[in-house]
Amino acid sequence: MTAQAIPASSPPASRQGFRFTPAVMIWPALLYLILTTQVPFFMTIYYSFFNYNLVNPGSRPFIGFENYIGLLTDANNFRVILNTLVLTLGTLVITLVLGGLLAMLLNRPFVGRALVRTVLISSFLVMPVVTAVVWKNMLLNPVFGFLSWLIKELGGTPVDWLAAHPMGSVIAMVSWEWTPFAMLILLTGLQSLPDDQIEAARLDGANPWQEFRHIVLPHWTQALEVVVLLETIAVLQVYGEIYASTSGGPGVATTNLPYFIYQKAFGEYNIGVASAAGVIAVVLTNILAVFMLRLISRNVSTGGGH
């Protein structure tokens, strides 16, 4: 008998069909993310090159970069960008310092620590508009606010904080909201620090400042990056606090990019200028976040060196 060639076995039908892999399972969520974020963003870029006003929707001439040039050359608009940077940087500095101090405090055992932690977190759970109303009417009001009462009791003259120091007042509101967030992230990073490193440093004669600079601060690198990145994105989008407290005033003293976009889009119906301002806000967010992250990484690595 002659041996017959045995045909190559074909894979089962189930293996020839479409297989669900982890990458395939991610695609629906990725597609949804693209449709809800990137498509509106590219539409914003598209409208930023047109003189598009909803008062006259039939006329939409192409004007190129004129919206961007107008935003970056007008003195009032440049003040808006400067206000955004001051608000963001001021809030970051205050929240990082206070959050770090509170994290180191809560990392030590004491009676009532859980209660103190809960109380300190509570301000982060308050809505932005409610925060603005509380600060405007209960704390900063020149007639019946708590600070005015305290100044009167000390023999001073009450101050209209929102009129005399508008940007400082807004920074205080936003910092009050975001300090608990920085505190929680930094406290989490601090609790993952091994105790033997601190004990070894103390045995070597390190003082508290050297202990913080060479051990705690380098260990905080990733936690600081998380705080800076998320807070930068969030603070650059601050709107409710300004809307409910100062309405961008006096003049444009507290007008930041989100509030400026609101004024142009819903006050003047100027979609072209509002879109250009939105694109600038996105670019500014990325630039500022990358700059702050690199600054923290360089300073922490330098401070942790011997």
Image (cartoon, rainbow, N blue to C red):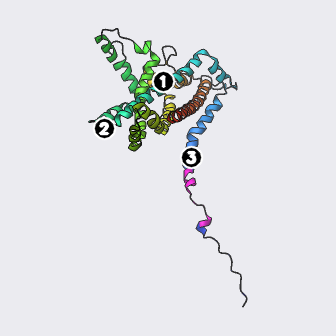
Looking at the image, the residue that sits furthest to the bottom is 1
Would you name the residue on which mark 3 appears?
Answer: 30
Q: Secondary structure at mark 2?
A: loop
Q: Which residue is pictured at 43% across the width and 19% down the height?
A: 169
Q: Is residue 246 visible?
A: no
Q: Which residues are magenta?
A: 15-26
Which label belongs to residue 109? 2
Tell me the amino acid under the disc marked 3.
Leu
User: Which is nearer the N-term, disc 2 or disc 1?
Assistant: 1
Would you name the residue on which mark 1 appears?
Answer: 90
Question: What separation in Å lies between label 2 and label 1 (alpha carbons)?
Answer: 31 Å
Q: Nearer the viewer, mark 2 or mark 3?
A: 2
Tell me residue 243's x, y (percent): 46, 22
Label 1, residues with CA under 10 Å away: few <14, some 14-19, many ≥20: some
Vertical placement of residue 273 versus 220, above or below: above
Tell me residue 253's x, y (percent): 50, 16
In the visual, does 19 lie left or right of 182? Answer: right
Q: Is residue 228 visible?
A: yes
Tell me the amino acid under the disc marked 2.
Pro
